[in-house]
Amino acid sequence: MTKTESDSRVGEDVSPAQALNAAIAGFVSDFKDFSHGVNAKLQKQDDRMNKLDRKTMMNARPALAAAAADEAPHQKAFSAYLRSGDDDALRGLELEGKALATNIAADGGYLVDPQTAETIQSTLSSTASIRSISNVVNVDATSYDVLVDHSELGAGWATETSTITETDTPQIERISIPLHELSALPKASQRLLDDSAFDIEGWLAGRIADKFARSEADAFINGDGVDKPTGLLTYPTVADDSWAWGSIGYVPSGTAGGITRADAIVDLVYALGAEYRANGTFVMNSRTAGHVRKLKDADGRFVWVDGLAVGEPARLMGYRVLIAEDMPDIADDAMGIAFGDFTAGYTVAERPDLRVLRDPFSAKPHVLFYATKRVGGAVSDFAAIKLLRFATS
């Protein structure tokens, strides 16, 4: 504090309150000066650290993409196996979790590292296949059983004193979905594998996902159930008026080998029960979709409406449309359009593990990678899906 503020003025009496105020003011002033000095020193130190960091970053060598980050033990061991066939690290690896308990090649390959497996799974889920709208479950067994109650539970009105009669009991249907082996066989040259900058895991994931996606998409629609899933269109079909459990009902388009009126689409939508219609999705291929887009109602309005917002998909009568190229083209008696709640109507069962066996001998100088997984599929609710048949009846 200053001399003027601490001493009494000449010829004047200073009260104790005034003296206290003067002392506090002097202390505050001195503290501000001290704080400014500390802040200035800290700022200089911060500037020096920033300059040092910039020099360090400029002198640092950029890391290769394949070695930029520390890999997990399983990923490093799997990468070594893919590149050189060295499986010592995989054999000595202890994996946690039931699904990863058998990583030895006794049954035909090693488990793919979790990151690569997740990449493949994400690609399969986003492809134009009914997998993306179906019920997908992971199982550890050789099959998956779905229990469906497709009958009505009996009920009736009664008074307090009336005799209650026995009502009907529900019937439980067991649908067993066996798992089948799905395989892919991508190959790469040994020279390419020896290049440390080559992203072997990313390449393998892309090739396997592409092969699996095309095979699954066809099997889920046209598979005959022999060593592959049972496809949607391979089940018995009957006119919806005489539909019974175990078959899929269809609605005729009213035109032989084609569809010329929007009323057929309306009939297809309302042939489905209200409990399924709220989650309904159309499934058709691109050629059929191009024809349906031209249909108009009685007032001349297109029944296929483009999305009103950016990124929103086009809708047919307000329902989503999935383009699946494995659906049949428009032809006589073809079941070219499906509509239903596929989450309830179709179930995909699969084992979560994916295995790869390295084969450097069969296709020299290339190295083959035999990838396998187990997957199955079947209709789990026959009331949840309806078909449009290109016929008069």
Image (cartoon, rainbow, N blue to C red):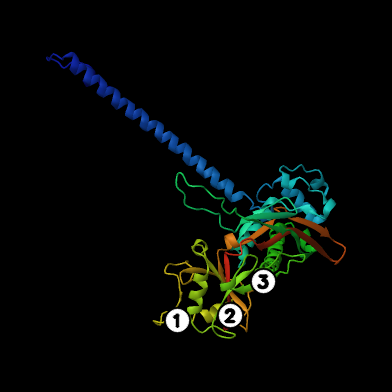
Residue at 81% in and 43% down: 92
Q: Is residue 284 visible?
A: no
Answer above or below: position of 7 versus 321.
above
Residue at 57% in and 70% down: 386
How many numbered markers are drawn?
3
Give whichever of discs 2 and 3 has the lower sequence position.
3
Instruction: Count residues near mark 3 (Cα–Cα under 10 Å), then give few for <14, some for 14-19, many for 20+.
Output: few
Depth check: give the residue in front, 51 or 240.
240
Q: Seen from this angle, which residue lies furthest left? A: 11
Residue at 52% in and 73% down: 268
On the image, the x and y values in percent for residue 375 come to 71, 59
Query: Between marks 2 and 3, how big is the CA–CA gap?
Result: 25 Å
Amino acid under label 1?
Lys
Question: Which of the labelled discs sits on residue 236, or is there none?
Answer: 3
Instruction: Count residues near mark 1 (Cα–Cα under 10 Å), then give few for <14, some for 14-19, many for 20+.
Output: some
Label 1 sits on a secondary structure element that is loop
In the displayed structure image, the side of residue 324 where residue 23 appears, left or right: left
Question: Which of the labelled discs sits on residue 296, or is there none?
Answer: 1
Depth check: give the residue in front, 266 or 171.
171
The quarter of the picture where the C terminus appears is: bottom right
For discs 2 and 1, the disc positioned in front in the rendered view: 1
For discs 2 and 3, the disc positioned in front in the rendered view: 3
Question: Which of the labelled discs sits on residue 287, or is there none?
Answer: 2
